[in-house]
Image (cartoon, rainbow, N blue to C red):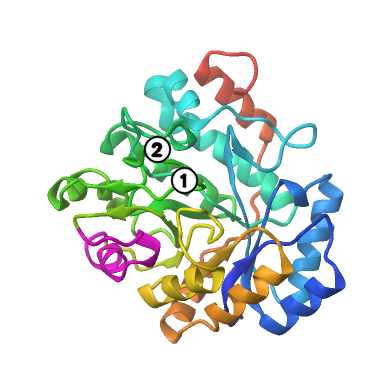
Amino acid sequence: MIGSGAAIFGCAGLSLTAAERDFFRDYNPLGFIVFARNVETPEQLIRLTAELRDSVGRDAPILVDQEGGRVQRLRPPYWREWAAPLDTVEKAGANAAKAMALRSLVIAAELRAVGIDANCAPVADIAGPNTHPFLRNRCYGQDVETVTQIARAVADAHLEMGVLPVVKHMPGHGRSVNDTHHDLPTVTTDRAALTATDFAPFRVLADLPMAMTAHIIFSAYDNLPATQSPAMIKAIRDEIGFAGLLITDDLNMQALAGSLAQRTARSMAAGCDVALHCKGDMAEMLEVAEAAGVMTEASRARATAALAQRRPAKSVDIAALEAEFSALLGEGAHG
């Protein structure tokens, strides 16, 4: 059973308020996302993820951004601290895919232990010389082959542990010289070059269950951010071949213009399956919910197929995984 509401929402604090419980029950969003503001201790987080699922009466997916480095919502002392992905990749050298797979197994095990079963990773964007610093060290490499190989290893490790990967940022964010939390970048690269580079890792990873869009204009297609562009969503479906559940990047990011209702409506009209709103602000959630409405039949089918890929949590020896990871990086502790 899946939710009917075409949105994924955050919540405000460490536990649900009565108003949040009532809203989630009534709107029945597909799932939820947690941020650092929602995280205190493992015991508290277990209670919160249970509360979120209880509010909709089903095993709703609960997402997080746990890439490692700057984008890591669960941190010490209860969870392991990880270096930025590109730092680990460069340190591991020829062992990069194996190292990233090992750390992904540990990350996924930690997430499942507190009730989180989807991670907004891998990042399949290709780093370039001008990639904005907000993204660059979150990438896995500077060429199609390296990024594709490592992204596949990261995704497979998550799936092995029962955590759904959400590949991002489709159809490719690496050419952005702006931080889309604040500005809307325009990429002027021609279609042939985009197909051969930025789009290529996503084409290989098109079988993954879920993906997140990029708030970037690709002028070779039109003058709209990809999240709100029918032409770009068509390219994601037809040229890249992605048939899974397509989630918007956070609709609060200032790369998008207009009210939240307008941002949401434009994204849904363009062909996104689910609107992502992360802030946990009740007035804003009501606005997004009204504009997103319920999932279409096609979106419900994609969501059902994606959630069907969740597996039971697998038991692993985390200490052994960490030791192997550290050995690959030539260090005494994980990084």
> Which numbered disc covers residue 324?
none
Residue of label 1? 122
Q: Residue at x 49, y 80 (%)?
A: 300
The Cα atoms of the two marked residues, 1 and 2, are separated by 9 Å
Q: Nearer the viewer, residue 144 or 100?
A: 144
Question: Could you tell whether 329 is left or right of 287 in the image?
Answer: left
Q: Is disc 1 in contact with disc 2, using a CB cutoff of under 8 Å? A: yes
Q: Residue at x 75, y 67 (%)?
A: 52
Q: Which residues are magenta?
A: 221-240
Q: Residue at x 32, y 67 (%)?
A: 229
**Residue 109 percent location from the top left of the image:** 66, 45
User: Which of the image's four quarters has the C terminus?
Assistant: top right
Kindly report which numbered mark, 1 or 2, lies closer to the viewer in this rendering.
Answer: 1
The amino acid marked with disc number 1 is Pro
Question: Could you tell whether 236 is left or right of 295 in the image?
Answer: left
**Residue 12 percent location from the top left of the image:** 77, 59
**Residue 294 percent location from the top left of the image:** 54, 84
The amino acid marked with disc number 2 is Ile
**Residue 174 percent location from the top left of the image:** 35, 40
